[in-house]
Amino acid sequence: MILPILAYLLFSIGPALGTFLVSLTNYAGIPGQAVQFVGLANFISMISNAASGFSASLETTLVFALSVTVIQNAVALALAVLLRNPLPFVGALRSMIFLPAALGVTINGILWLLIFSPSQGPAAGLLAAFHTSSAFFGSPTLALVLVIFVQIWANVGFTALVYLASMDNIPHELFEAAQMDGAGRWSVFRKVTYPLISSATTVNVLLATVGSMNVYDIIYVLTDGTSNTNTLGMYMFNTSFEGSGDLGLGASVAVMMFVLTMAAALPLQWFLRRREVSV
Amino acid sequence: MRRRRAWDHAWKLALAVVIIVPLYGLPLLYLLSVSFQSPVQFLRNPFSFPHPFVLANYPTAWVQGDFGRYFVNSVIYTASSTMLSVLFAVFVAFPIARRYVRGGSFIYSLFLAGFFLPVSIVPLFIEAEKLGLYNTRWGYILLHLQLGLTLGVLFFAGYFSNVPKDLDESALLDGCGYFRYVLQILLPLSTPALVTVSIYAAVSTWNDLIGPVVFLASNDYFPLTRGLFSFYGQYESEWTLLAAGVFIVAMPLILTFAFIQRYLVRGATAGALKL
């Protein structure tokens, strides 16, 4: 029991707390250079120095997280409503939307990089038919939209399945009673289904919020943070591991991400829990 | 009424198919088709059925991408880190679930807290360098214990607390040792938790791309994800080869997915709805 807990402290909770510690240093990982305690200098230069790129990253992250959370949940809910009927092939369709979860970011990313390849991809071919073209993931205006799309594409299956599981828990009599009372399709959804899956909504919205504010692996594959897709996660990764290798600054970006995530998730959780209805 | 119902289902099916198939089926199907085309056909008409049907892209990609070695690495990393983390988790969860140790609930909340802390990649990297885990196989395995261990303790503690305590005592009376009891009697009773935790840990380790970018430097140690990403960088313009490479890596996942899908779904929904 001691060994596993040690492993946990060493490889999980220790490093997580270590983020705070490293964020207060000028750790650069260069051999021979002394590591100094610099207090809040990383945070101050990050926020006050306009050239640091922090505020642009912050904006990108907020756009990314808000779009992903809202669209992913709306689409997942619609898919869940469609896929809960005993239709033929419904199992195959459910599998299809869940498959990206197994394929992982590398395959998902490369798949869409190829589809949206500006030179030989099918999307470029389609645009060429309309006598236009785009740089897609290289386009400063379009790249972020596409990255948001791929993130939703990859995760909407999971979200939809959580909604589906929650809908399956609703007693069937409730629907029958509502229909008996002459409720239409929309009001059954609005008055019966939607309130009764509120705990799934809480989970899905929170997971999407926390996930989208911290994700960067899919962005690393798609753009590496170029063309205005430099979210805070990407900024943290590139500051730490590419170019200058400023690990201290990278850690302070990670701390900022943590603070922002909590600032978004905690009030959201309070609000979502309050509106939950129990079955 | 019945006619209306059938019609109702028909348009829902049509809508679902129209949304899902183009977005999820066609991109993969297109790439699969490209992987069997000759470069000449790809340049002339990539949307047509492969003609001539070229199988050679696969062996070529396999050799040039060095996927054999990456595959072995991925298997080693995934199997070891999953088994080790599950083993560790079991022996933390048991005493906690049974309250055989003091401060059990504190340890439990320590593991729960693991989900709510900052991204730890920077300190992990520093630690990896200091402890000599950087760019080594076993270091890479140790650095991937995180998810299985955290998830495992939470899942197993829940399962073990449902097993009657009498079982512990009768096993003890029968002279069954601690390790044997936990592994051979208790663990099989918690198969659903075991399967869910293992699958989640395995999938996340197998698909990790940031890990090998940060913790590994030499080609020899790369797992499939990193290998495929390098292959993409090298052969960006040779689509037919690239498509074959993607499918070499994707095929085992698609086949495994067919078997593990229900466990993934069960884990996702059970975990998510209990949260």
Image: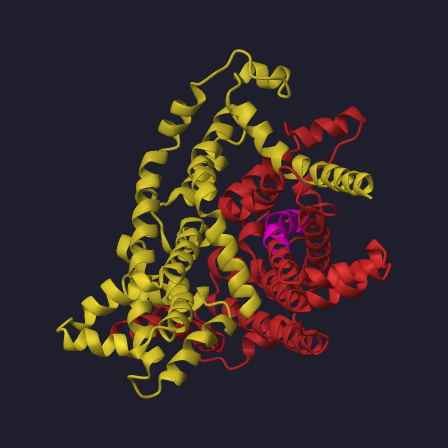
Chain colours: A red, B yellow
* Residue A241 pos. (x, y %): 47, 58
Q: Quadrant of residue B57?
A: top left
User: Relative to B83, is B108 above or below?
Assistant: below
Q: Looking at the image, which residue is at 31% across and 38% down?
A: B69
Q: Check residue B125 for magenta coloring.
A: no
**Residue furthest out toward the top:** B52
Question: x%, y% of residue B34?
Answer: 55, 24
Q: Is residue B147 left or right of residue A270?
A: left
Viewed as shown, does residue A47 lie left or right of B15? left
Q: Position of residue B90 (x, y in %)?
A: 31, 68
Q: Is residue B102 above or below residue B169?
A: below
Residue at the spot 19% in from the left edge and 66% down from the top edge:
B180
**Residues in magenta, as a range:** A147-160
Left of B200 or right of it: where is A116? right
Closest to the observer: A228 or B38? B38
Q: Is residue B136 visible?
A: no
- The answer, for residue A133, to whether it is visible in the render is yes
Query: In which image quadrant can residue A70 be found?
Result: bottom right
Q: Could you tell whether A63 is left or right of B137 in the image?
A: right
In the rendered image of this protein, does residue B242 appear above or below residue A182? above
Q: Residue at x 49, y 74 (%)?
A: A23
- Establish if A127 lies above or below A74: above
B56 or A144, which is in the foreground? B56
Picture coordinates of residue A198, whole percent (x, y): 69, 68
- Which quarter of the rendered picture does the C terminus of chain A lie within? bottom right
Q: Quadrant of residue B158?
A: bottom left
The residue at 17%/76% (across/down) is B172
Q: Main secondary structure of the magenta part?
A: helix
